[in-house]
Amino acid sequence: MKPGIFARLNRMGAWMALLFLVLPALIAIPVSLTPKRFLSMPRGEYSLRHFETLFTSPEWLSSFAQSGIIAASTAVLATTLGTLCAIGLWRVTSRYTDIVRAFLLLPLIIPQIISAMVFYRLLVPIGLIDSYPGLIIAHTVLATPLVLITVSASLANFDPKLEQASRNLGASNWTTVRRVILPSIRPGVFAGALFAFILSWDEIVVTLFISKFSVYTLPRRMWNGIRENTDPTVAAAAVVLIAVTLLAFVIYALVLRHRAQPGASEG
Amino acid sequence: MQALRKHISPGWLLVAPFFLVVVVFYLGPLLNILWLSVTDPEPGFGNYSALVTSDAMARILWTTFRTCLITTVFSVAIGYCLAYAMVHAHQKKQNIMLTLLLISFWISVLVRTFAWLMLLGHNGLVNNAFETIGLIDRPIRFMRNELGVLIGMIHYMVPYAVLPLMANMQTLDPRVMAASRNLGANGVQTFRRIYLPLTLPGIVASSLLVFILSLGFYVTPAILGGGKVLMVAEYISVQLLVTLKWGTAAMLGTLMLIGVLALLWIMTRFMQLSAVFGGGATR
């Protein structure tokens, strides 16, 4: 069947839509190279001074470090909790499984502004507002559902007979999980860890409510920069964030390709 | 312990840690907020009566509803076009398109909002380009009004609109469309009478998803609206952080929560939640 005129128009429209999605973010690159002290497009002259500011300013550097610590801790906790939970839900055959799963996905689905209220309400009385543990708890609750989803998707392709075989051969529950199940679902676990890291690294709405002075993550500092709308260092930070996103994407694509290789059963 | 094990599947032990975390760290304070909406500052439905008595409140709710509706219509239309082209493209092109879509999906919302700020400003690239080619005499006002908020929101929501639509279109049997053509229908008829009705569940799921996400969207409206386009999410943050009116914020949060849960319930009638959140493509 030859593609009709509508199909061809649609295809052109689709490519334009993709350009609309991807191109705008790239404007951060020229803006970050402006030699001026204010946000502007460079005209003929380029300078790396704003990147220099970004990587020498103690404020920005500490924000990078704080975001890194919080995102890494979140990724570890969320991956542990989420993977255990996904394996548990996969093994249980009960009429409550679906309800429990839906309930556990709630933090991801409920609008973030409500989550922000929730964590504000939670952290103020126990004195953890504006602290590392507070942010890590909040981000972990938000990120674990992502791990639950990716690991569950991996488990859907895992043959339950392998688990039975392992147990029949005398392996304990724990050994079965560690030696049989985990190696088969590794791509899902990695993808989940990556998603959890990115979620925390980018998280702004909840962070705005539960951090003030002592914890000042990268998105928090960018938010301020964007609000003030003068300092081009924000543009440099945006470029770095785009680069980090692309890097994460490449890692993700490699993990997926690994999964698509023969040996991992598909579909 | 042994007796307990017989009745409770050991799988629940693995579920328990996260379950407890959600109950203690999320559900608890959430219920507390619902409670606050009828007890703060005084017991009763005083907070809710503001919905009918306060003009400002009515305006905020109407702005939110209208903005979310327009965002949903445009995002799903663009998303449908994209999903259709992707599902029917060759494998190689499909991979390129999917990569571009996912990259835009992954780029931080702050980076994207910042980009729109640079593009749409009074002296922004868009206005400059339009003026250079003589399309306009005076700069168009994109920022601090609904137009800017809509552009930013649609840009953010399109990838979310595409995913459920793609999941739905991938399950369709191309032979049905071929049969329609063989029976004498032309391409447009086949699309309108066969393809569109078959993709209706995808359209509904994607619309609901985008609408739900738009309802609580905070970052882009707050920055691109510049305080001129006040939506519920920003109003809640003002109540909490500036005027410290927990009752009003809790009331609005409760309303939003009820709305979102109702829409989600409708959505599950059309599609499995796991399919919406990316599980569908790998299933």
Image (cartoon, coloured by chain):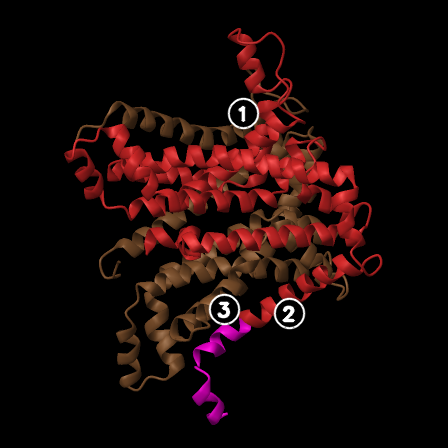
Chain colours: A brown, B red
Q: Position of residue B263 (x, y in %)?
A: 53, 51
Judging from the image, what secondary structure is the residue with disc 3 in?
A: helix
Q: Amino acid at mark 3?
A: Val
Residues flagged by tags 1 and 3 on a common chain: yes
- Amino acid on which disc 1 is placed: Pro
- Nearer the observer, A103 or A95: A95
A192 relative to A201, above or below: below
Is disc 1 on the same chain as disc 2? no
Q: In the rendered image, which residue does mark 2 sit on?
A: B24
In terms of secondary structure, where does tag 2 sit?
helix
Is B117 placed left or right of A188 in the picture? right
Is residue A66 in view from this perspective? no
Disc 3 to disc 2, C-alpha distance: 15 Å
Q: What is the chain letter for disc 1?
A: A
Residue drawn at 75 percent across, 66 percent down? A126
Residue B204, placed above or below residue B138: below
- Rendering quarter of residue A125: bottom right
Mark nearer the viewer, 2 or 1:
2
Q: Position of residue B59 (x, y in %)?
A: 71, 36
Residue B275 is tagged as none
Q: Which secondary structure lies at badge 1? A: helix
Mark before the other along the chain sequence, 1 or 3: 1
The residue identified by callout 3 is A100
The chain ID associated with circle 2 is: B
Marks 2 and 1, Cα distance to the nearest angstrom? 47 Å
